[in-house]
């Protein structure tokens, strides 16, 4: 008989350039006339035609059960109005051509042909983004969101490629496994930077062996 998913509580970490470095960049305001440098978004839009648009999201909640990545592009997301929002992430796990064959044993092939290793639940972190800043996700960074309070809507500017959602949207779906159920009490990460939000984010445990593009 199928078992119900386990709910894991994750305490959000305040997103800063330092805390978010493993997943991408946090870009904040710079003075007019400043030269391009390492604090600017380091973009990779070379594999298609860029698409910059306003994304309207409605009815989102502070929880998620699926997580996705884009192998062909960096992605930028920011709240129009500098509202508070949240993003679940895990480090990129793409298998590149120069990776050793040992990692390929556990790899999954996407419908678009690239290889990746699905993230484990305990590798997921949730970040709180507030104020006039935006997130640049590294190519391959796993992400869930944007997330925000129930019953509201929010507009985001979004930079990706014109076909990202059609051909570069690899999703790991939630499926429950015994390992996750037995160890779920240990999956809340310790706060290392910044204050926690008043409400933890809920993540339904999944078995990364079950994937879909």
Image (tube, rainbow, N blue to C red):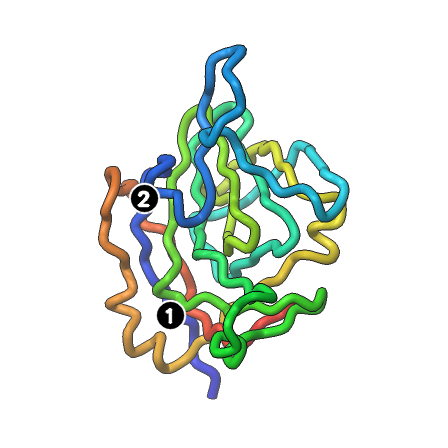
Q: Position of residue 36 (x, y in %)?
A: 53, 24
In-front residue for pair 28/185: 28
Q: Quadrant of the C terminus?
A: bottom right
Residue at 53%, 11% (x, y): give it. 33
Q: Secondary structure at mark 1?
A: loop
Front label number (1 vs 2): 2
Percent x, y for residue 114? Answer: 65, 66
- Residue at 54% x, 37% y is 42
Secondary structure, mark 2, is strand
Residue 209: where, in percent of width, then height?
51, 77
Which quarter of the figure has residue 122?
bottom left
Label 2 crowd bin: few (<14), some (14–19), many (20+), radius 10 Å: many
Residue 6 image label = 1
Residue 173: tell me if it is visible. Answer: no
Residue 113 placement: quadrant: bottom right
Residue 210 in sight from this viewpoint: yes
Q: Which residue is identified by label 2?
A: 13
Q: Position of residue 208 (x, y in %)?
A: 49, 73
The residue located at (23%, 54%) in the rendering is: 190
């Amino acid at each position: 008989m199928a078992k119900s998913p386990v709910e894991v509580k994750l305490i959000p970490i305040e997103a800063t350039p330092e805390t978010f470095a493993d997943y991408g960049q946090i870009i904040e305001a710079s003075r007019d006339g400043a030269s391009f440098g390492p604090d600017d978004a380091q973009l990779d839009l070379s594999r298609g035609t860029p698409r910059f648009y306003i994304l309207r999201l409605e009815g989102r909640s502070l929880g998620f059960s699926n997580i996705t990545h884009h192998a062909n592009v960096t992605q930028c997301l920011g709240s129009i109005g500098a509202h508070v929002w949240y993003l679940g992430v895990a480090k990129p796990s793409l298998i590149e051509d120069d990776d050793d064959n040992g990692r390929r044993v556990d790899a999954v092939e996407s419908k678009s042909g690239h290889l990746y290793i699905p993230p484990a639940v305990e590798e997921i972190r949730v970040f709180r983004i507030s104020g006039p800043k935006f997130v640049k996700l590294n190519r391959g960074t796993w992400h869930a969101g944007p997330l925000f309070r129930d019953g509201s809507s929010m507009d985001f500017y979004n930079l990706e490629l014109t076909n990202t959602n059609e051909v570069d949207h690899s999703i790991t779906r939630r499926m429950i496994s015994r390992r996750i159920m037995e160890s779920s009490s240990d999956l809340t990460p310790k706060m290392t930077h910044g204050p926690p939000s008043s409400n933890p984010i809920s993540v339904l445990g999944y078995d990364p062996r079950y994937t879909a593009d």
